[in-house]
């Protein structure tokens, strides 16, 4: 129990709503204007007094602090974590609290069930936006970051989330990234970190390397300058070494199947073969140079009529004939401006150029042309493919466009062969034998043919079986200032890479005044000459520091471990604490992190597991992706070039019309359509969009908290629909949960006094509850408990609403029933629940109160039909509990319209009541 002690609860009564930054001043002015106009509405309950009071109490008493060294580890643990937020300058919008509210409900619920709960919050604060702002304004990223964190923290506290703020940290703190650097050293020591030449987005006009998100359609997002793919020496992490384990261990995780499938596809394990095609000289002779291709369809080798190499293939320059050199070089230069995404998934029309050279198909002995095309990526497989246009859609489109021969080698399963048609299904082999090479797979099913070809390749030395992955090693460097420095140096006279000793950590960022790019491709850290030039602490030799920094993903790969032991200066995490708290029981965040963040974190965790630093094989046992909240529905009318309104059903291409936003009050809903009120013949387009500043549809939670209270916002976000679904925001709909809280308040506290205030206590009575009341309560307990366990918070709220509807009809509100209901309400609306708990006579917080338990006997439908007689004549019946008292039966009878009419204007002489048998009212 968290006792109040000497803390004066009502000292907080005079404290106003805590708003954040400039918004606080704006809201105060708006409130003054409302009061002056007399338009400020009557509050359903005094949330603006209650909420700041309890937020102040929780903070002063550190109510949700999870003990560290004095933790009772005999109790079960529950570690629930929100995905690390990036503290942007825009602050929260109403979509952000969706997941935070869900984790808070579960945290509060588990505390009340006797669990040790770890529910922390921190900040993934390195990142591009703060650095970009620094470039534009000269403001140090650290300053901007701290301001943004302060705003975010203020907003989160205003929503009553039960985080253990004693464990808060940011990835930008040297005390934290010291251990990020330590993990990098372990990766380097074990051969999982290395340097390689890889293509990056180079913008000559800006003189810098750009992140993928800074490049749009081949030009820089800032300024629209051309961007080229340029090879640069970069740090890489060998995540591919863990590809099989990352794939296999997904089966043991309680994650959404769709998310696991996304990771499986990203890893992209495939079984096939590497085949060597000899490159022919201009005279048609085989030389020493061979081109290795990777294929999963070895069965179709007889259908390979050309080879395609990526524009960045290392052997390309040696394959180009002199007469094709210029067109090939022009093509590769154009390809260098495209991202891999543009070249693969987004590019519909295939382009390419003939290299002027040929290679020999080892199965047929034929010379086939070598083409260069950007739909083949140098980062996948070997950067070269054997093209089988009859049985691959990309190869087919390319062959048709460039008039390359197509040879069909698979006959469909049904035997119906259609020449000139693309076929990518199963079947048996045709046109697949060669006397010259001795390979014959005609008539074999596809699977058997593939196996036979692999055996032939290995026997003849033309290739070998190979498992491949789409997963690439992780490019682990940014040419930026605002990130973790690498803990390595390069000896000047040998360029040897030297990892710094752990005693030298953390390597902190030097102070810079100029964050703009160098213009040479070197990172901004290169400007800190006195920092860059150093000496090897072991040999004393002159050395140079690495000037690239780690990517934003680095700090977020392991923060869940640091929350277990955030103040430890001697180790990443204390082993006993990690063994108790790990793994994270529930991890909640958006689906946009389904692949990269989760994959990188799993990779690092497995490395730490293999070296004995952690005790679990996986970091996150259960994962929940909350849905997104879209902005309010927008209604759009279309006008043609003459300004005439056009009904939406007659609009085929919306780009050809002028769009006009229509306010909701001018919209008429008719069945499933939305019409213009002033002209119902005009149907409008109705659509909700993702919230964004550019669209102007962002809803600030501060405004909702000011108008309705944090508990209303929390309840509304949970009541909108299932947690995992996409939902559409509607501010007017908050009124429903706001009124529910008002009815709850009046049920327990009573109606307001004539001056608008409320009594100090409650209207609850110290009496034993009736059977009917106990049944209503325990059905509510049972339903709310089940729905919290199943994260079906919307239906849990519905159960509480049903209870309030029933309870408001009771003449007397037993204290024990009201207390139990307040405990059920507390995870959802904690401010109101704490206030009601206090008014019900408790001198301690309810945060660690025992969760109400369902009593099965009250769940049974024990109602019976009781005949009711008036002066000995049966006039109707009522449903009562088997143990109903005479007073309860009489009250139910008088509330029944068919019976009460006989009592109007009459005097009741006496009542005869036989439990479970009859009620006779003598007039």
Image: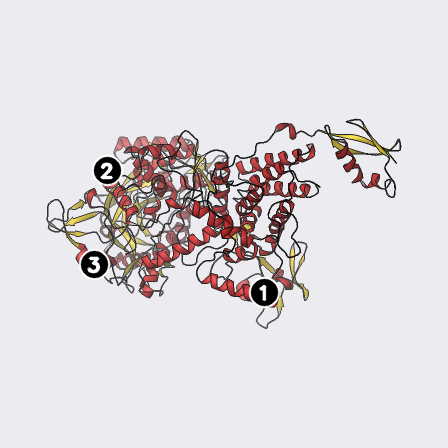
Residue receiving disc 2: 190
User: Sequence order check: which comes first, mark 3 or mark 2?
Assistant: 2
Residue 853 is tagged as: none
Instruction: Point out the frontmost of discs 2 and 1.
Output: 1
As rendered, which of 743 and 145 lies closer to the eye? 743
Question: Marks 3 and 2, how far apart in space?
Answer: 31 Å
Residue depicted at 81% across the width and 41% down the height: 897
Q: Can residue 291 be seen in this view?
A: no
Q: In the drawing, what numbered circle is on residue 35?
A: 1
Verify CB contact (< 8 Å) between mark 1 and mark 3. Answer: no
| Label 1 secondary element | helix
Count residues near mark 3 (Cα–Cα under 10 Å), then give few for <14, some for 14-19, many for 20+: some
Q: Residue furthest bottom?
A: 642
Say whether marks 3 and 2 touch (CB < 8 Å).
Answer: no
In percent of width and height, residue 170 lies at 34, 49
Residue 576 or residue 43, whichever sits in front: 43
Frontmost of labels 3 and 2 is 3
**Dot 1: few (<14), some (14–19), or many (≥20) neighbours within 10 Å?**
few
């Amino acid at each position: 129990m968290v006792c109040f002690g000497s803390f004066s609860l009502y000292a907080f009564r005079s404290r106003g709503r805590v708003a954040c930054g400039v918004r606080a001043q704006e809201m105060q002015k708006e409130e003054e204007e409302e009061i002056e106009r007399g338009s400020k509405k009557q509050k359903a309950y005094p949330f603006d007094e209650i909420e700041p009071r309890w937020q102040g109490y929780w903070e002063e008493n550190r109510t949700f602090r999870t003990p560290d060294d004095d933790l009772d580890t005999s109790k079960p643990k529950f570690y629930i974590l929100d995905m690390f937020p990036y503290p942007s300058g825009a602050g929260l919008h109403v979509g952000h609290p969706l997941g935070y509210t869900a984790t808070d409900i579960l945290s509060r619920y588990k505390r009340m069930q006797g669990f040790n709960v770890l529910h922390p919050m921190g900040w993934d604060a390195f990142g591009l936006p703060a650095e970009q702002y620094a470039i534009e304004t000269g403001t140090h990223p650290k300053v901007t970051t701290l301001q943004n964190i302060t705003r975010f923290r203020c907003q989160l506290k205003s929503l009553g989330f039960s985080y253990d703020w004693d464990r808060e940290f940011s990835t930008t703190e040297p005390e934290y990234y010291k251990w990020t650097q330590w993990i990098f050293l372990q990766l380097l020591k074990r051969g999982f970190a290395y340097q390689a030449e890889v293509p990056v987005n180079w913008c000559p006009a800006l003189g810098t390397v750009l992140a993928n998100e800074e490049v749009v359609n081949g030009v820089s997002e800032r300024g629209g300058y051309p961007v080229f793919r340029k090879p640069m020496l970069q740090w890489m992490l060998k995540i591919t070494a863990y590809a099989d384990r990352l794939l296999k261990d997904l089966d043991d995780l309680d994650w959404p199947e769709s998310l696991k499938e996304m990771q499986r596809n990203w890893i992209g394990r495939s079984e096939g073969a590497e085949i060597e095609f000899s490159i022919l000289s201009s005279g048609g002779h085989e030389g020493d140079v061979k081109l290795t291709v990777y294929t999963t369809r070895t069965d179709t080798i007889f259908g390979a009529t050309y080879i395609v190499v990526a524009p960045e293939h290392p052997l390309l320059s040696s394959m180009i004939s002199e007469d094709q050199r210029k067109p090939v070089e022009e093509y590769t230069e154009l390809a260098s401006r495209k991202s891999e995404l543009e070249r693969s998934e987004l590019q519909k029309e295939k382009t390419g150029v003939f290299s002027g050279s040929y290679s020999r198909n080892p199965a047929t002995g034929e010379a086939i042309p070598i083409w260069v095309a950007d739909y083949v990526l140098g980062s996948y497989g070997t950067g070269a493919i054997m093209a089988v246009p009859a049985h691959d859609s990309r190869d087919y489109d390319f062959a048709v466009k460039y008039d390359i021969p197509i040879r069909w080698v698979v006959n469909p399963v049904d035997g119906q062969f259609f020449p000139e048609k693309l076929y990518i299904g199963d079947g048996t082999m045709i046109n697949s034998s060669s006397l010259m090479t001795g390979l014959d797979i005609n008539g074999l099913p596809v699977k058997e043919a593939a196996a036979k070809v692999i055996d032939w390749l290995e026997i003849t030395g033309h290739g070998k079986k190979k498992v491949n992955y789409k997963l690439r090693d992780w490019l682990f460097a940014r040419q930026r200032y605002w990130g973790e420095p690498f803990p390595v140096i390069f000896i000047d006279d040998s360029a040897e890479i030297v990892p710094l000793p752990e005693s030298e950590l953390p390597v902190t960022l030097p102070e810079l005044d100029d964050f703009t790019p160098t213009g040479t491709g070197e990172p901004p850290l290169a400007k800190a000459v006195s920092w860059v030039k150093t000496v090897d602490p072991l040999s004393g030799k002159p050395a140079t520091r690495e000037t690239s920094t780690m990517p934003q993903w680095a700090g977020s790969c392991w923060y869940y471990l640091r929350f277990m032991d955030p103040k430890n200066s001697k180790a990443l995490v204390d082993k006993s604490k990690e063994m108790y708290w790990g793994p994270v029981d529930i991890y909640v965040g958006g689906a946009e992190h389904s692949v990269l963040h989760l994959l990188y974190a799993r990779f690092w965790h497995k490395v730490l597991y293999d070296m004995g630093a952690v005790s679990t094989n996986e970091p996150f046992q259960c994962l929940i992706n909350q849905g997104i909240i879209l902005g309010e529905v927008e209604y759009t009318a279309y006008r043609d070039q003459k300004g005439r309104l056009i009904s939406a059903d007659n609009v085929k291409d919306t780009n050809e019309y002028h769009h006009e936003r229509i306010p909701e009050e001018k919209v008429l809903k008719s069945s499933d359509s939305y019409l213009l009120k002033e002209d119902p013949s005009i149907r409008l387009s109705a659509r909700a969009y993702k919230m964004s500043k550019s669209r102007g549809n962002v809803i600030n939670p501060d405004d909702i908290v000011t108008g309705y209270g944090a508990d209303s916002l929390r309840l509304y976000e949970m009541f909108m629909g299932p947690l995992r679904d996409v939902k559409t925001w509607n501010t007017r709909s908050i009124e429903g949960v706001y009124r529910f809280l008002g009815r709850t308040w009046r049920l327990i506290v009573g109606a307001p006094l004539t001056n608008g205030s409320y009594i100090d206590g409650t209207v609850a009575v110290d009496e034993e509850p009736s059977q009917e009341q106990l049944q209503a309560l325990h059905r509510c307990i049972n339903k709310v408990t089940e729905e919290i366990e199943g994260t079906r918070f919307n239906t849990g709220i519905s159960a509480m609403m049903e209870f309030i509807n029933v309870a408001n009809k009771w003449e007397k509100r037993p204290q024990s029933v009201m207390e139990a209901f307040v405990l059920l309400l507390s995870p959802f609306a904690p401010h109101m629940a704490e206030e009601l708990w206090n008014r019900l006579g408790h001198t301690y917080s309810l945060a660690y109160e025992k969760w109400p338990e369902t009593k099965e006997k009250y769940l049974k439908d024990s109602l019976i039909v009781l005949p009711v007689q008036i002066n000995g004549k049966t006039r109707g019946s009522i449903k009562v509990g088997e143990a109903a008292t005479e007073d309860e039966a009489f009250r139910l009878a008088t509330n029944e319209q068919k019976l009460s009419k006989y009592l109007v204007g009459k005097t009741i002489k006496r009542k005869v009541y036989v439990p479970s048998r009859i009620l006779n009212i003598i007039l």
